[in-house]
Amino acid sequence: MFSPDDTIVAIATPAGRGGLGVVRISGSEAREVAGRILLRAAPLSPRHATFTRVRASRAETDRAVDEVIATWFPAPHSYTGEHVVELSTHGSPVILHDVLNSAIDAGARLARPGEFTFRAFVNGKIDLIQAEAVADLVDAVTPLQARVAFDQLEGTLTGKIAALDGRLLDLVARLEASLDFPDEGYHFIEPQAIACAVASVIDELDELLQTSKRGRLIRDGATVVIAGRPNVGKSSLFNALLGHARAIVSETPGTTRDLVTETCDIEGVRVTLVDTAGIHDTTDRIELEGVWRGTRAREVADLLVVVLDGTEALTLEDDRLLKDSDGRGRVVVANKCDQPSAWRRDDVVAVSATMGDGLETLRRAMIDALGGGEALRDSASISNVRHAALLERARRHLAQARDAARDTGTPEEFLLADLHAARASFGEVVGAHTSEDVLQHIFEKFCIGK
């Protein structure tokens, strides 16, 4: 999917203006390409930041386009494992594209999305888990997301899977040794010992898989829809959770007629909050459309925050919403707790959207309802659905091997087949055995320059 022989170049910093920008060149000819565009006679020294200037394209070889800091990282001691030259320029998009075009004119090819990280993977600098963690770290919008991604980049999940795979390898080696000496009657491991060893691996794998729900919540975030009848304080609560006035708030019922969406950080989780039109019967076509859109949003939400007015008796619309949302992930809120209450329920969180009372309790209740709880403050081992699916598959093969080992009449070849299949799943997680289609699907989501 990528040519590993070309020398590639790309802008490695985000689009837009900034104090600095970086152009990255990687490949066997990286130093030579840099030498053709730098206005200096001496070659770059390894791992030394060098102040110099970059010449324009071939048509204007004597004109400098910018002053830069050039650093050469000889292979294999670089991000990609190849020769890499990084040029730190001023952060103007015009300057960055001039330097990029000069490098292309000098023989480099424009990199494709994720090609630098793909080369790091191919050259053994990182495994596939760490490569995916790079993308997660770049995309992180909350500190907890960044911490989980960095833990995986550091190899925490890789180390756990390697340890489990090592134990399976030992079992496979003993079983294969027994099969190599069938006539002599040697048994390097007994079936009961195999069953116990595999069961132990399954127990540790189960502990790892239990982290996947929390991990995916951290990585992917959640959509939370705020619902209720008109004028119960949905928009006020929406603004209070965001920390700024995003939705229009008015005493006039029905102010919100469309979906209002904003992303925020709640207890370290990226939450997409959706404010909806009030649920009520109406003949107004615009209001009907708003109510319908709110209904659709509730159907696909990860969590509902059902807002009730604590100062008024519950209405038919309140009862209908409570009944429709029963059995789903939800948090029931009694708003306006700073005023006398007209009713009480044990399953509600009392808040005052205007005064700020109860908001911290509500945030914790939302995370608990999403399945996170306090454990979200610990590093999640699994945050990627691909990893979870492959480890689930490995567990199924291990369960079959355990059951077969307990049945003394099962041939050892059957146990070996399941153990090999489990190890193959482990290999797919880290990228040791992964199809080109899967690799392309993973790396095409990266930004150019990473």
Image (cartoon, rainbow, N blue to C red):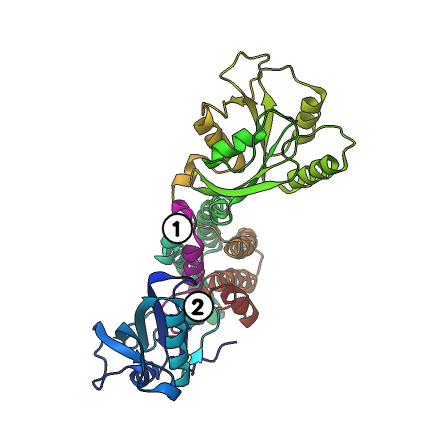
Q: How many marks?
A: 2
Q: CA distance from mark 1 to mark 2?
A: 45 Å
Q: Is residue 364 left or right of residue 34?
A: right
Q: Position of residue 397 (x, y in %)?
A: 55, 56
Instruction: Please say if 241 is above or below 167.
Output: above
Q: Position of residue 347 (x, y in %)?
A: 56, 21
- In the depicted view, which residue is nearer to us: 264 or 283? 283
Q: Is residue 80 visible?
A: no
- Neighbor class of circle 2 (other Cα within 10 Å; few <14, some 14-19, many 20+) is some
- In the depicted view, which residue is nearer to us: 364 or 255? 255
- Which numbered tag is attached to residue 340? none
Q: Quadrant of residue 29?
A: bottom left
Is 144 magenta? The answer is yes
- Which numbered tag is attached to residue 177? 2
Q: Secondary structure at mark 2?
A: helix
User: Mark 2: which amino acid?
Assistant: Ala
- Which numbered tag is attached to residue 146? 1
Instruction: Please say if 69 is above or below 405.
Output: below
Q: Quadrant of residue 411?
A: bottom right
Q: Secondary structure at mark 1?
A: helix
Q: Is residue 430 visible?
A: yes
Please report the residue visible at 39 percent of the width from the left and 61 percent of the height from the top: 17
**Magenta region's main secondary structure?**
helix
- Residue found at the very far right of the displayed protein: 283
- In the depicted view, which residue is nearer to us: 209 or 344? 344
Please report the residue visible at 46 percent of the width from the left and 42 percent of the height from the top: 269
User: Mark 1: which amino acid?
Assistant: Ala
Q: Where the C terminus falls, by quadrant?
A: bottom left
Q: Which residues are magenta?
A: 123-145
